Image: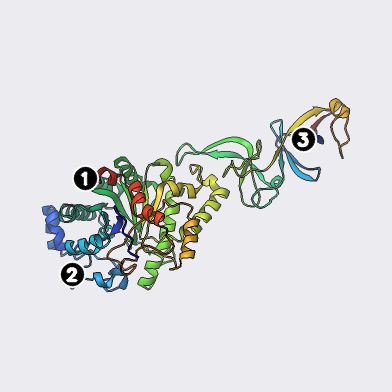
Amino acid sequence: MAAVVPGTIDCDIHPAVPSIQALLPYMDDHWRDMVITRGVDELNTISYPANSPLSCRPDWRPAQGRPGSELAQVQAQALDRFGTSIAIANCLYGVQLLFSEDMAAAFARAVNAWLAAEWLDKEPRLRASIVVPAQRAERAVDEIERWAGDPRFVQVLLLVSGDTPLGKRSMWPIYAAAERHGLAIGIHAGSNYHNPPTPVGWASTHTEDYVNHAQSFQSQLSSLICEGVFNRFPALKVVLLESGFTWLPAHLWRLTKFWRGVRMEIPWVDRAPADIVRTNVRLSLQPVDGPPDAAAMAQLFEHMQSDELLLFSTDYPHWQFDGTDMLPAGMSDQLARKIMVDNPRATYARLTETVA
Amino acid sequence: MSWHVVASVAEIPPGGRKLVTVRGRPIAVFNIGGEFFGLLNRCPHQGGDLCAGVQTGLVGSTAPGEYTYTRKGEILRCPWHGWEFDVRTGQSYCDPDKIRTKAYPVEVEPGTAVVKGPYVAETIAVKVEEDYVVVDV
């Protein structure tokens, strides 16, 4: 189905750093020298193995180079093809994996400067998330402050599996900065691999790692709610990216059930977790983790109890759907419009500042 | 609706409770600091015996990491799943507008008044010199 809605906003695409060489012009003399002298290799992770079918849709796979690393290809494949008016670039480069917060800060700064100069300056339909050194909240805040004045940055990007549950108060300076500047917090699938990316230890396969991210998202959602992030930062919007969404109703049902019985552990949570999600949390559309069955999906949307939770995404260049079948079965035109236009605009305050 | 004598005041001291049956309804009667309250002894969730629940304070918060503890003894936790109910009103904490257990008016009347009526005293022997707990059912 080619349901191009005017004003469509794609909330998750992945321009890629073609190689570490591309970042060198955006580093200061010290770090440029360190990369060369120390022989720092590509900050690749095993989240998206180069030859995995997931990592790039076949018809988007370039003859050479990393998928998503050429502006012209991204323009043609991710923007023109879907009639997208705005797309949010979430750059996945292994900045979060580093154990040195200093090096992570240098790489985050370089990635953001590269995004601004090589992508945002050249393509007015693009917006971006600020890559931050989540290794240390104070350094992440420095990076947020550096870019907050540029309205083309609409979000702060975190990985779903890092060093700590994201609700922990050590992370709160990041949320304070995001709320202060009207930036959403985007939590994307992926791990810094400092800990096993599954709750039960190191899995053997890419399949397990990828599918089990859903449990990590559930854990982070519980953490953010239970630790009181949304009580302290009521205007904060958190967007779960590449998370899947069919798990949400069951997880919220269970979390709300426990809150009813043992909420004295977290007395600041003064309303049901499902209500908090409705006001503060959004999820990207792709990958659609449900069946190609209109009746089943319609039932699922009903269980979500809101038509404001999902944000359209293609997850370009990841292979989540074929052709232009980016919307799941069972979605009404009205819901499609909400997901593709209204919900993203309501979530990302900065889009309405910069989009006429 | 009619007033029923369910206990002498001496039977339910402050902090105490008594499960009574009035017109076939199981009602838990509580004494909180000399004030009496009656709740249907049935959790609206799955029917747990509220009379067997723990009475706690109201745990609240002014901000994440800040804990307050007020209204000691006025919150009843269902023994089955821990849902909290306000003993004074029967309202749940989790969804006070929709989830509540029925609250019955409870008063204390002197034996002299109870003997005259119109109170119903099905199983309680009434003496004029004592005070009695009466429930409107």
Which image quarter holds the N terminus of chain A? bottom left
Characterize the local packing of mark 2: few (<14), some (14-19) or many (20 or more) Cα atoms within 10 angstroms: few
Query: Please, is residue A120 above or below residue A82 in the view?
Result: above
Asked whether the viewer can see residue B101, the reply is yes
Query: Please, is residue A196 above or below residue B105 in the view?
Result: below
- Per the model, the C-alpha gap separating discs 3 and 2 is 81 Å
Characterize the local packing of mark 3: few (<14), some (14-19) or many (20 or more) Cα atoms within 10 angstroms: some
Residue type for callout 2: Gly
* Marks 2,1: beta carbons within 8 A: no
Which comes sooner in the sequence, label 2 or label 1? 2
At x 68%, y 51%, the residue is B48
* Tag 3 residue: B136
Are the residues under badges 3 and 2 in a single subunit? Answer: no
Of all chains, the one bearing label 3 is B
* Marks 3,2: beta carbons within 8 A: no
- Per the model, the C-alpha gap separating discs 3 and 1 is 67 Å
Q: Is residue A244 left or right of residue A316?
A: right
Query: In the rendering, at what x and y percent does residue A332 appear?
Result: 42, 58
Which image quarter holds the C terminus of chain A? top left
Of all chains, the one bearing label 1 is A
Are the residues under badges 3 and 1 in a single subunit? Answer: no
At x 13%, y 52%, the residue is A28
Of all chains, the one bearing label 2 is A
* Tag 2 residue: A65
Residue type for callout 1: Asp
At mark 2, the secondary structure is: loop
Query: In the rendering, at what x and y percent does residue B43 appear?
Result: 67, 48
Query: In the rendering, at what x and y percent does residue A183 appear?
Result: 30, 46
Most foreground residue, A330 or A319: A330
* Tag 1 residue: A150
Name which quarter of the figure residue B111 lies in: top right
Query: In the rendering, at what x and y percent does residue A354 appear?
Result: 24, 45
